Image: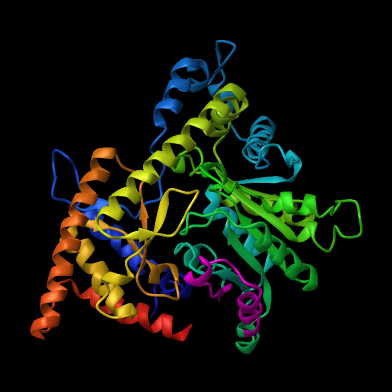
Amino acid sequence: MRLLSSKASCNTHGQDSSYFLGWEEYEKNPYDEAMNPKGIIQMGLAENQLSFDILESWLAKNQDVAGFKRDGKSIFRELALFQDYHGLPSFKKAMVDFMAEIRGNKVTFDPNHIVLTAGSTSANETLMFCLAEQGDAFLLPTPYYPGFDRDLKWRTGVEIVPIQCTSSNNFQITESALLQAHEDAKKRNLRVKGVLVTNPSNPLGSTMSRNELNLLIDFIKVNKDMHLISDEIYSGTVFSSPGFISVMEILKERNYLQDSSDAAQVWNRVHVVYSLSKDLGLPGFRVGAIYSDNDQVVAAATKMSSFGLVSSQTQYLLSAMLGDKKFTKNYLSENQKRLKRRQRMLISGLQKTGISCLKSNAGLFCWVDMRHLLSSNTFEAEMELWKKIVYQVKLNISPGSSCHCTEPGWFRVCFANMSEDTLNLAMKRLTTFVANITGTNESKKNSGTSRRTMSLPNWVFRLSSRDHREQEER
């Protein structure tokens, strides 16, 4: 007799992806400068730790807020008791104003059309529940965030059909690739309910072009039963040109007025996901949001948000912080400068080893090209290289296959979740490894000797065959 439900016991969570398994290896042997200097350095976690001092400085200057006081009097009881799942009006107003500020106030957002969720994971899943039935599909451009296999599919039963993008045009979405993905879904007898993109992209670290956004809007305009979800959780991390363009800005440029007949055709089927996890560096606070001009989606998502609410204490604290316009202006500017400097450090370190990156202007990571280090142009060779980097170099990075990249040899490498000293150490380790592997490969070519198999846990070999089989099936 089965003790657990089929949902609980199924293998569709995605936890056995190399993306998550690399984390597991890191957790077994985490690097620490003093306690474990030979441990694994975590470069697979897109976390922004570069501007905590700015946040802590604000908290030190606003101790009443941090202590849950208003005008010197405690409001702990008020915050601790039951709150409506619609959220605190003051926080929703502060949130939409912050979103507008990030977008240069080129667009504005109505606080009545925002739904608060426990992070963007909850926001994306909630939209799947609202917009699609089990067995329906969404189109996603590759490479995409590995967690989407869990967030979008696991509990909802929604399928992901990849829009195959390539390095030939820096992984931008093309009309032919979009239409091919739609055809692929039809061949699988899947009803496509829309397209989901991350802008800026995770894992590419680049913003979407105006042409790409217009292409997607044209696509859903023609396909009137489809939606467009723009996950914009990295919008405040854009640190160099070209600047960030929100899908809402494109709609405004195209003169789609909400009170016109086009509203039902376009505005009501475009939805934005946002979070404070990346821009403000607060993933532990679990603050996410859905923004939609579709009243039905807002109503349904609000009901579903009761399964993943943001605490009243968190909302109170952040409403004060985001309401401080002097703070937000300084934070966004300084954080972007720090991200730009740190990205340049990573790129410079990689270049010294002969490794290049896709040109990027946003995010907390780089999309790194290690194709020249592969023993062959296969995903098997990519996994073999990844194993060596995890176990020999002691760096946890994310292989492109975990992001469903169509080309072997690309890796996502994070740079904002560690100190400069740790990043320099990581580059030193990688430099030594590349020098050794380059020399070893050259001598093997000359001697004709075969590679020696590493002694690795069994899950690594199971993972290799599984990931490569999935790539072939796509």
> Going by the image, does 74 lie left or right of 127?
left
Percent x, y of residue 101: 65, 35
Up-down: is 215 above or below 351? below
> Going by the image, does 181 lie left or right of 387?
right
Percent x, y of residue 94: 65, 32
- Give the extent of the magenta segment: 158-183
Residue at 28% over, 39% down: 420
- Specify whether residue 80 is in view: no
Residue at the limit of the structure toward the top, as seen here:
72
- Specify whether residue 223 is in view: yes
Q: Nearer the viewer, residue 224 or 107?
A: 107
Residue at 28% over, 73% down: 383
Q: Nearer the viewer, residue 290 or 350?
A: 350
Q: Nearer the viewer, residue 296 or 168?
A: 168
Residue at the limit of the structure toward the bottom, as seen here:
187
| Model colouring | rainbow
Q: Nearer the viewer, residue 167 or 139?
A: 167
- Magenta region includes residue 171: yes
Percent x, y of residue 194: 68, 69
Query: In which quadrant of the rendered image does the N terminus lie?
Result: bottom left
- Magenta region includes residue 16: no
Percent x, y of residue 177: 60, 77
| Image-quadrant location for residue 413 | bottom left
